[in-house]
Amino acid sequence: MAWAGILRRSDLEKPMIGQLNLAAPPGAKPNDNDMEQKRLVEKDAPLKKDDLLVITGAGGFIAGNLVKHFLKKGFTRIRAVDKKPLYEWYLRNPGVENLCLDVSQEDNCHRVCEGAVEVYQLAADMGGMGFIERFRIECLRSILINTHMIEAAYRAGARRYFFSSSACAYNTDLQQDPNVRALKESDAYPAMAERGYGWEKLVSEMFCQEYWAERGMKTAIARFHNVYGPHGTWDGGREKAPAALCRKVIEALDKQDLNITIWGDSTATRSFCYIDDCVKGIDMIMHCDALIATPINLGSSELVSINDLLSKVEKIAGTKLQRHYDLNAPRGVAGRNSDNTFIKQVLKWEPNTTLDKGLAATYKWIKEQYNKRKAGKRVVE
Ligand code: NAD
């Protein structure tokens, strides 16, 4: 019997419900279906530089940087889509077809996917812990985006479909200790995902697996772990820890009030993936036949406590602040790290930008935005 990672077209013949053994780890012993897989994954025609790439959520952080990545690689037909008005996009890349459309609406998804060779679905209503704990319904409603987009991509005859999943899909029972064991791909099942956001991601992953199993569309699923870097959210309530801490340190220095309030008791641990590694990883995962319909971690394995993260930011800024802890603020799980055994095995690569290097670039960028805003210039937060 096949496990989730190796569902193949041959499974079409078999009843699916109740047969999926989603807990089997990637890298499990090959079985008969592996042999079928090797026969049945048809080779793509080489991707041409003028093939149409559709990237949704492109007014946001990761997808905006992904557009930039493909432009740099020489792709000439990129359709970037976001529901935000264009002036609110973090990055507006020249030479790109920018569409302001809401992809939770089915009709829009068909328009968006028309002629697409590859679709990268990164649109979601999301933010840091503060947002996903407070707005669980909004997070769950992203299911509309993911159901309509994958169907539209399939009907448009897209060759490959990428889905941006999250480490929030992992079983939260395994993340109760700051000295957490790094999460490997099979740890999502038995399922006990993060309320709202995590469950939505898990179900949408399943769509990707079944569109491959039942309909033969090649799908890719990456579970991102806390992505950070320039051109991301840095203020307003949706920002994540690295951006929030950079901004707070910059603010403290600017106001000469050397105090900082941190959410939680700061012993929680996380790993943070630099944006350049993230977009490189998306490209590699999307084009790897061994990873079709197979969820994979895309994160750094450099674990850090929030306290140590702040110390790093202070070092970059050349200051030391008096720390205050807001124990009523949203905290999320106690610890979370990415086990990169599988990605190293399959791609011979893992996200490798050090936190020190990535944070320095992020701090510099946020400081520029902060100063621009202070000078009365328009910035996107
Ligand atoms: P982001 O908020 O910067 O970008 C998401 C974009 O999607 C936003 O610009 C938003 O306007 C757009 N969007 C939302 N609903 C839409 C709709 N109905 N139609 C069209 N556009 C819509 O977030 P991001 O950090 O760039 O995240 C991108 C993807 O990666 C998301 O799916 C997110 O869940 C996932 N992810 C991100 C992280 C992270 O650390 N940033 C971690 C795990 C997973």
Image: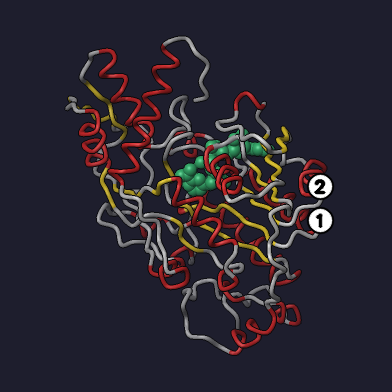
User: How many other residues sit within 10 Å of disc 1, few (<14), some (14-19) or many (≥20)?
Assistant: some
Give the residue displayed 18% in from the left and 26% down from the top: 319
Q: Where is residue 264 in the image (x, y as percent from the top left)?
A: 29, 36
The alpha-carbon separation of the residues under discs 1 and 2 comes to 7 Å
Residue situated in front as seen by the camera: 123 or 78:
78
Q: Name which quarter of the figure residue 287 lies in.
A: bottom right
Find numbered disc 2 in the image and state the secondary structure of the residue it sits on: helix
* Residue to which mark 2 is pinned: 110
Q: Where is residue 20 in the image (x, y as percent from the top left)?
A: 60, 74
Contact between marks 1 and 2 (CB within 8 A): the answer is yes
Residue situated in front as seen by the camera: 30 or 326:
30
Do we see residue 137 in this rendering? Answer: no
**The label number, if any, that marks residue 156 in the structure image:** 1
Drawn side of residue 200 relative to residue 48, left or right? left
Considering every residue shown, the one lying at the far top of the view is: 376
In the rendered structure, which amino acid carries the disc numbered 2? Answer: His
Figure label count: 2
